[in-house]
Amino acid sequence: MLHIGWSGLLWTVINLLVLCLLLKKFLWQPVTDKIESRQKEIRQNLAVAEEQRIQAAKVKADYDARLAQAERESQELLRQAEDRGRREYQAILASARTAAEALAGETQRQLEGERSAMLAAVRKEVAGLAMLAASQVAGRQLGSGDDRALLEEFLAEGTLAETGGGL
Amino acid sequence: MFSYKSLSEAAAKVYDESRRKGGGILDKLKEVLAESMAGTPAVSVFGLFSVPQSVVVTWILMALLTGASLILTRGMQRIPNGRQTLLELGVGTFNHFCEENLGRHWRVFAPWLFTVAVYIAAANLSGLIGLAPPTRDLAVTAALALMSMLLIYGAQFRFRGLGGGLKKFAQPMPVLLPINLMEVFIRPLSLCMRLFGNVLAAYVIMEMIKTLAPAVVPVAFSLYFDIFDGLIQTLVFVFLTALFLGESIEEEE
C-alpha cells in the first residue's frame, strides 16, 4: 500500500543539494558572516575601549603625580622665600639696631665732649670772674700766674661741686 | 480550546452519518486515504518527461525560498534594522543550536541542517498557500532521511577515520554492537516515517473535518494540524539529525 517513487526520491536528493547550495550562498552565509563580523567588531571595540581606559587611568595617575609634585615644589619655594625674607628682615633689623646703637654712642660721646669742653670754658670764665671780683675786693691786680693757678685749683676742687649739678 | 469531548462528539457524528447514509462518508474517507498513500500523481514537464507532483512543488518552494533569501538579505547594514534583526535572530539561534550539539565542527554541517529545517518547514506549511505538501510524499521524506543517514555515518568515518568510525559502533560497550548496527537503518526509517506519518495524518484528519464541517471549524483545526504540527515535525527532524550527528562526531574525552 505504501509506495516510494524512486524517481521522486532521486529528484528530491538533487533538489535538496541544489537548495542547500542556494540557501547557503544567499541566506545562511551572508547572515552568518554579518553576525560574526559584528561580533568580531564588538570584541575589537571592547578591547580598544579597555586599552584606552587603562591608558586614560595611566595618564590621570601621571597627571596627579605631577600635580602633587608641583604643589610640593611650590610649597618648598614659598617656604624658602619666607625663610629668606625672615632672615633678611632679621639682618636688616640687626644692622639697623647696630647703626642706631653706634649713632647713640657717637652722640653720647659728642655730648660728653661738648659738655666737658663747656665745663672747661665755664670754669675758665668763672675763674676769670672770680679773679676779677677778688681783685676788685682786694683792690689790686691779681696778675701773677700763681694766683690764677691757685684759683683754678680751688674752683675745680670745691666750689664747682654744687655749680656742676646745675650745669 | 478543542476538548477531547468535542473530538469524540465529532467521531460519533461520523459514525452516525456513515450509518445513516449507508457508508457514504466512510467510502469517501477511504478514497482520500488510498489516494494520499499511493504517492503523488505524476506531472509532465513541458511534455518532455514526467516527475512526481511533490518534485514540482519542491521546485516552486525552491524558487520561493531563494527569492525570499535574496529579498531578505538585500541591503544588510552594519547596524541591523527590524527585518535584519529578525533574520539574524533566526540564523543566530540556529547556529548556536548547531554549535551546542555539534561542537567544534558545527560550521561544516550548519548549512545542510539549515536547508533541511527551512525546506521541511516550508513544505509542511505549503498547504496554506494551496500547494500539496511535498512531505506528504514518502519519496521526499525518504530522501531527507537517507541524506541525514549518509551525513551522520559519513561524518563518523570522516572525523574518526576508518578504524575510529568502525570502533564507534562498539561504543559505549561491545554488547551494543548489534543495536548500533541496526540503528543505521532504524534511525533514517523512523525519521522518514515520523515526518511522513505526521503530515499524512494531519492531511487525513483535516479532510475528515472538512467533510464533516466545511466552514469555519477547519480553520481552527488547521492552526494545529497544518501550522503547529508542521513546525514541530521540522524541529523534531532537525533536532534528531543534529543529535545523532553530534553523537557520531563527538570528541573522545
Image (tube, rainbow, N blue to C red):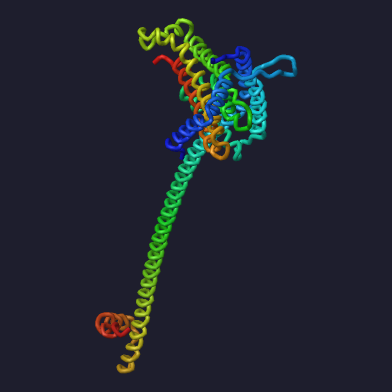
Where is residue B144 shown, x and y percent of the image? 55, 18
Q: Nearer the viewer, residue B48 or B60?
A: B48
| Up/down of A56 relative to B178, above or below | below
Name which quarter of the figure residue B27 lies in: top right
| Up/down of B36 relative to B4, above or below | above
Where is residue B79 shown, x and y percent of the image? 60, 38
Q: Quadrant of the N terminus of chain A?
A: top right
Query: Position of B122 compared to B162: left or right?
Result: right
Where is residue B190 shown, x and y percent of the image? 47, 17
Q: Quadrant of the C terminus of chain A?
A: bottom left
| Up/down of B127 relative to A100, above or below | above
Name which quarter of the figure residue B54 lies in: top right
Name which quarter of the figure residue A163 lies in: bottom left
Q: Is any part of residue B103 visible from this angle?
A: no
Q: Nearer the viewer, residue B7 or A167?
A: B7
Where is residue B164 shown, x and y percent of the image? 44, 8
